[in-house]
Amino acid sequence: MRLTAAILAARTVAALSRGLRRGGGTALPGLVAERLDPGLVPTLAARLGQGSALVTGTNGKTTTARMVRGICRKAGLRPVANREGSNMMRGVAAALAGSVRWDGSFSAPKKRIGIFEVDEATMPLVARSVEPRAVLFTNLFRDQLDRYGEVETVATLWRAAVRSFPAEVTLALNADDPAVASLSDVALGKVVLYGVDDETQAGGSLEHAADARWCYACGSELEYAVVFYGHLGHWRCPGCHRARPTPDVAVSALTTANDGMNVTLRTLAGEVSVRLPLVGLYNAYNAAAATALAVALGIETKAIEQGLAGVTAAFGRQERLAVDGREVQVILAKNPAGVNQVIRTITADGAPKHLAVFLNDDIADGRDISWIWDVDFELLSGGVASLVVSGRRAWDMALRLKYAGLGERPEVEHDAKLALRQAIAATPEGGTLYVIPTYTAMLDVRNILGRWSGRGAFWEGDAR
Amino acid sequence: MKLRLAHLYPKLMNIYGDRGNIMCFERRCRGREIEFELDELSIGDAFDPGAYDLVFIGGAQDAEQRRVVDDLRDVKGEALQEYVERDGVLLAVCGGYQLMGAYYRSADGGELPGVGLLDLWTEHPGPDAKRFIGNVVIEWEGETLVGFENHGGRTHLGPRARPLGSVVTGFGNNGDDGGEGAVCRNVYGTYLHGSLLPKNPRFADHLLALALAGENGDVRLAPLDDMVEEQAHAEALRLATRRSIIRR
Ligand SMILES: [Zn+2]
């Protein structure tokens, strides 16, 4: 009875907020449902015939979860998923309440599988409620420190959570991230490791944003034979001789061509070769992560290959929109490691770029903007054809870019529409404009560009 | 003219974009044709008190702060003391600021000894205590300094230190006495990051002039094009003060 009321209320609120066009307003239905029936998530999650899998970590959650859902569909399953940006408990509640019938039952229950992306700090709580079959940890970078306190706090939280998982839970872990790989030391169940073997992708020395330079076990400074980005690479500890474990799923070859890349993944069940419509080493990591989780779920190679091949850019992640004869690419800026990857990816061809950079400081962006000083914006120096800076903290960003050598007085326009108009006008017809916004700015930018390109606004788009 | 800067523990103490402060010193020297030399000193490296005009130490996570404490006391402590007695200029931000005091008592009650260059001590009231997080504005020498603070520890000053400024909005040293940061001789400590110096150019120049005066007598720094710096300062000031009205 209470369950039905909760489901009904959640759906009504969801319909209302869509009607009111509260873009991305996906938290409220889940919140209402949870209030009415705190047992809703465990009850409904237990009715998923194929169980659930969680995707957590600082970067790559949204794209990876999207890939895993594609793979599941190719394997004949019917995924239930939360919307990106709604990755707390209430987002999972909203997803479950929105997927069942009024009586709380699923259609085709035997084929149902929950694929939930969850916030790093919320993961233990969600895991207790949905009792997942598998949990994927992507990486651990500095992100919005004003929210979590410290990277070390999250690492400690993860270790405690993993220790408490029953032996039936399989982990998918990034072997190249020492903080994530070390979770295998405390895991009771099976572990599927993934990483990058292709050493030609090495990015040189550790970036300024690199975090986990020290061995969690003995405190020694880690040594790297290869650094891919941030602190991801082939690491070893000179103190206790822990080292990057050999991955079960590895990117063995990666080539970039025409707005996409060809990725070869070595798995225990054979090779997976796919062409992704995404670029950047970080997306190769996402593909490896999705494959590792699929392997952990017992999905066959063929479905993995088909699922990855069919993937499309998630909202604001290298999403391409056509506006006024220009291609506009929106790439979310989350944290130093992520932005460094974006910069490295878009400057790879050496041609000068047209850019619009948006910096907001809402909670979802991180209220503390000091992270922009850890981004290696200097890599853009000499490679920018036009630049417009916007967002609530536009002048802070303009100052950072001035320091990076992108001009003594960068163009600042606080109004998002005017800023985009200016940036599009500065981009020649047939050219590409790269828009790099923080999260809440991304929602604005995407709504405006969606309208101008006829693609639709956020609340009409499907983030599933 | 030449400025010789020592950056202490750049790999360990760098949590809040502290690199921006170093870049600021460098940029504001080079823009005036002042030579700039940077030494990064890590754990185990000796500190030569006669070799520098300016010393910077940034913030860290607790775990990394613990790694630094022993080295700060046993390897560099005496030399730093001598540097300060010669009126050497030092800027310490956030975690580095806490380590300049007598001690830091963490949330679990453990105590980290400080290096004692500033007359102050810091105590974390416990894991349930409110963390001081947010935009902050302080009044300093008739001007404003803007930044962001994020600390659980409450800092209290002894008689031989005075606050760097008074809190206009935000929490400051302890959320209680209205003081923020500390100054003792030429040692400056503050919780403000953001990065602090790029958008507080007058404070950066104040430190530079002090540092250069040691070797060169009275120094007048030529003006620079600070249009973007001043705009960033004004924007941070406007947002911090507007929000504090809404939130309270
Ligand atoms: Zn070790």
Image (cartoon, helix red, strand yellow):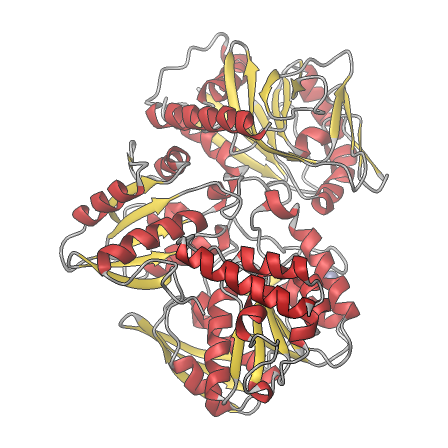
- Tell me the residue at 71%/30% (across/down): B98
Residue B126 appears in the rendering: yes
Image quarter of the C terminus of chain A: bottom left
- Can residue A122 be seen here? The reply is no
Q: Residue at x 74, y 65 (%)?
A: A161
Q: Position of residue A123 (x, y in %)?
A: 66, 63
- Give the camera-side residue of A72 and B142: A72
View extreme (left): residue? A429
Query: Residue A360: image x %, image y %?
Result: 43, 42
For the N terminus of chain A, the image quarter is bottom right
Residue A443 placement (x, y as % from top left):
39, 52
Percent x, y of residue A142: 57, 51
Q: Nearer the viewer, residue A30 or B83?
A: A30
- What residue lies at 72% left-to-right and 58% top-to-bottom? A157
Count the labels in the image. Answer: 0
Q: Viewed as shown, does residue A309 lie left or right of A168?
A: left
The quarter of the rendering in which ligand 1 is drawn is bottom right
